[in-house]
Image (cartoon, rainbow, N blue to C red):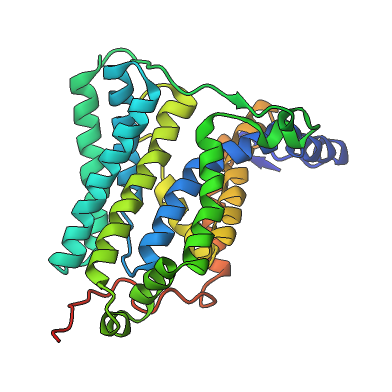
């Protein structure tokens, strides 16, 4: 079928070859890697939304983290210092969002949108100020850590245990978050702040403090996701390199119904969609280039359409709360 001068594969042999390559080790290894920044951002968003704060500024927080990571690594020569810088930069943006949403009681959607727009402009300005405009400035980045013995397991070892340390940290964050939410008193307070803040306040839970803390933590974790893009993949900062991943992470939270395990699975699904774009290009599949690039965003759109009216967010998500006077 012609489309833009290209042809969509139609023969059985072409489709069989395509399916075989999409199930290869390299594809799934890339899916796990591409899902990593989504996992960081989505888990941070999950915690924030569970406390009642909607944060659509993930895109901006990831972008700030990506730039902060490269700047820190550039100044220190150490990617771990860059990671710390990325966390602090993301946390600072999260703190600003918390101030607007909790103290000022401003519109959470407007605040998040402002963060995205400001981050795009600020990182572009700062990157051109600190680095050479006519050439890419590379920094020391994270190297892959092959986990002894586990990395030698056929297929599983190559897919899961031959990555940079941030990949392991992202997926370790999932069970930690699940344990925190469902097995600790802190988790009960977090969920109460997002579901019934008045009831939580009545029994002594400071809703404002929890929302402040978790929104700031969301920024820090999203900043780590951004640092993965710049220090775990390309060793440099590229303007607008988050490329919509913050919004995909938001979709993953909804797709995963605010549960850490399901959210992580959704991130892997979107990561696989992202990995398929590179895989299809590498295989020189006769498909329109524009259609290939649409795959991860089309998957996000279809996920939203499929879940329309079937999910229930925290009851007080996006609603400002004023502490009652007792």
As drawn, 70 above or below 155: above
Residue 142 image position (x, y, % from top left): 48, 24
Which sits in the foreground, 293 or 207?
Answer: 207
**Quarter holding residue 11:** top right
118 with respect to 305 (left or right): left
As drawn, 270 above or below 52: above
The residue under the point 36% across, 73% down is 194
Residue 321 image position (x, y, % from top left): 22, 76
Quarter in which the N terminus is drawn: top right
The residue under the point 37% across, 72% down is 189
Q: Is residue 124 visible?
A: yes
127 with respect to 227 (left or right): left
Which sits in the foreground, 200 or 271?
Answer: 200
**Quarter holding residue 195:** bottom left
Q: Is residue 290 visible?
A: no
Residue 64 image position (x, y, % from top left): 29, 38
The residue under the point 33% across, 70% down is 52
Quarter in which the C terminus is drawn: bottom left
Residue 161 image position (x, y, % from top left): 66, 33
Question: How many discs mark residues in the rendered view?
Answer: 0
299 with respect to 241 (left or right): right
Q: Residue farthest to the right?
A: 12
Which sits in the foreground, 54 or 275?
Answer: 54
């Amino acid at each position: 079928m012609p489309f833009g001068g290209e042809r969509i594969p139609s023969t059985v042999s072409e489709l069989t070859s395509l399916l075989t390559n999409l199930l290869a080790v390299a594809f799934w290894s890339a899916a796990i890697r591409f899902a990593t920044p989504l996992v960081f951002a989505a888990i941070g968003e999950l915690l924030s939304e569970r406390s009642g704060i909607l944060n659509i500024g993930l895109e901006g927080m990831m972008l700030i983290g990506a730039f902060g990571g490269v700047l820190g690594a550039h100044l220190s020569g150490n990617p771990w210092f860059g990671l710390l810088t990325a966390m602090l930069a993301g946390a600072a943006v999260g703190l600003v969002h918390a101030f607007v949403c909790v103290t000022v009681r401003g519109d959470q959607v407007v605040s998040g949108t402002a963060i995205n727009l400001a981050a795009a402009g600020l990182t572009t300005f700062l990157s051109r100020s600190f680095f050479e405009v006519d050439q890419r400035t590379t920094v020391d980045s994270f190297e892959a850590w092959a986990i002894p013995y586990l990395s030698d397991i056929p297929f599983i070892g190559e897919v899961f245990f031959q990555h940079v340390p941030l990949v392991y940290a992202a997926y370790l964050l999932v069970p930690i978050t699940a344990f925190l939410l469902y097995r600790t008193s802190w988790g009960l307070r977090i969920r109460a702040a997002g579901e019934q803040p008045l009831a939580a306040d009545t029994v002594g839970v400071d809703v404002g403090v929890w929302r402040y803390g978790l929104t700031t933590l969301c920024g820090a974790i999203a900043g780590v996701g951004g640092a993965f893009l710049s220090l775990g993949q390309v060793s440099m900062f590229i303007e607008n390199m988050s490329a919509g991943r913050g919004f995909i992470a938001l979709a993953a939270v909804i797709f995963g119904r605010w549960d850490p395990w399901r959210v992580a699975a959704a991130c892997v699904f979107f990561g696989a969609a992202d990995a398929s774009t590179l895989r299809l290009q590498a295989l020189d599949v006769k498909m329109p280039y524009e259609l290939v690039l649409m795959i991860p965003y089309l998957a996000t759109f279809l996920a939203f359409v499929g879940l329309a009216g079937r999910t229930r967010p925290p009851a007080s998500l996006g609603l400002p709360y004023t502490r009652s006077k007792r």
